[in-house]
Image (tube, rainbow, N blue to C red):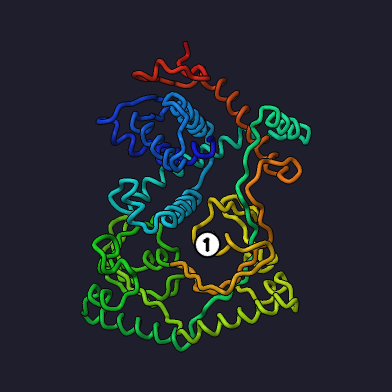
Amino acid sequence: MKYYMLLAFLFILTGINAQERVKVDGVAVVIGDNIVLDSDLKKFKQELEQRMEGKPVDITDCEILEEIMLQKLIAHHAVIDSVDISEAEINEEVERNIAYFTQQLGSMDKVVAMYGFNDEEDLRKELFGIQREQILIRKESANITENVDVTPDEVRTYFKNLEVDNNLPEFSAEVELAQIVKILKPSEEEIQRVVGKLNEIKKEVEEGYSFRLKAIINSDDPAVSSNGPGAGGKYTITRQSGFIKEFKEVAFSLDEGQVSEPFESGFGYHIILVDKVKGQERDVSHILIQPEITNEEKKAVEEELNKLRERIIAGEISFEDAARQFSDDKETRMNRGLILNPQTNDTKFDLTRMDPKLYNRVSSIKTGEITAPFYEEVRGEDKMFKLLKVNEKIETHTANFSQDYEKIQKLALQKKQEEVVEDWAKEKLSDTYIKINGAYVKCEFQKNWNKF
């Protein structure tokens, strides 16, 4: 339950919109400089119900409120303790969450609509505030628990207690994956064609042709024909906007009315026109052209991987050696092709939380088997063919001390850390301004939030 509760905090931990909504929304609690609104509890519960996928949510409003208050208390004292965070790390977290939400829902428009924002820029501003507070909470919590550790005896005792209480956790099916990647690269002739086309457009715009019309006719940016940001190739950006680094660097190096030279990014090749400079903002128009890779070029790479797969299956070369010699992926090539799970930073993927496309690739194959080559393209990144090998597959099972020691150790450590944070919170209540309003005054909290 704690896992789902922490996920559900994402859209209620910031005070940015809370300050704007306070006039029409009841304040449930004030903790230091932070407030919790009545609507925050409702939003939390809705998010929790979605995360539980229809399973009963056995938690009261008072329990929800106490969890939120604890997070607000930690955030409040992080500011008092001058916890240091940088704008760069906040933006990194924002981008990671944007990528996750977009992947889960299918498009940025669906993300914006689901969470009730006006547009992508509005969403990003809100996420910036949320992630700032999340990082403050994380760093302050780490400071509180930095000296906490568990011994093997404590892990064993923790497991035995779960066993005696008939409360051993169920661990989901997991898989360890390795990959060989061949990146598709356009020919030099195709790159020169694209750059030449952009230089031609740049010249025509400088001679007076409409950049907007040129964008509508030529740009490969799918937003160019939309009604929102990117329509006609036009965007308003700041240095904090979630645009790729290359795009912002070029945009902020130009004067008003200036058209850039063609430049490359993970999306393809661009030119940018700065329409207007407005303080820290730029109104810019851009044209994106992506070099084409022919079907013949794709087929050649696919066949190359097919032959490599046959050699691996025949025992002529190991998958690990093949990854080291032939894979184009820098992160996994020198690690025997092993793929790290970005959520946990280890090599195991929970099949129930895996990206649906990846799940479909590996759910039906057994340990030691290799997929056929398949094409993959992520917008803003490379186009590629891949081979995936299932190094290990562990089915859903009740926790086993020897097999799952590392997981049990993490759970035991997490429990001990939570106990330390709880003790810390009880000490901080006495010197923190806390005001509980309305019906919540009658809540029976575990800690003395009411101070009487």
Q: Is residue 284 above or below residue 133?
A: below
Note whether residue 146 is visible.
no
Give above or below for 143 relative to 202: above
Q: Nearer the viewer, residue 328 or 114?
A: 114
The residue singled out by tag 1 in the image is: 360
Above or below, 352 relative to 235: above
Q: Is residue 283 left or right of residue 261?
A: left
Q: Quadrant of residue 262?
A: bottom left
Seen at 64% across and 32% down, the residue is: 167
Residue at the image position 61 percent from the left and 79 percent from the top: 306
Residue shown at 60%/50% (left/top)?
A: 344
Taking the view exactly as shown, the residue that stands out farthest to the top is 452
Residue 426, quarter of picture: top right
Residue at 21% from the left image edge and 79% from the top image edge: 208
Residue 391 falls left or right of residue 422? right
Helix, strand, or loop for circle 1? helix
Residue 258: x %, y % from top left: 30, 72
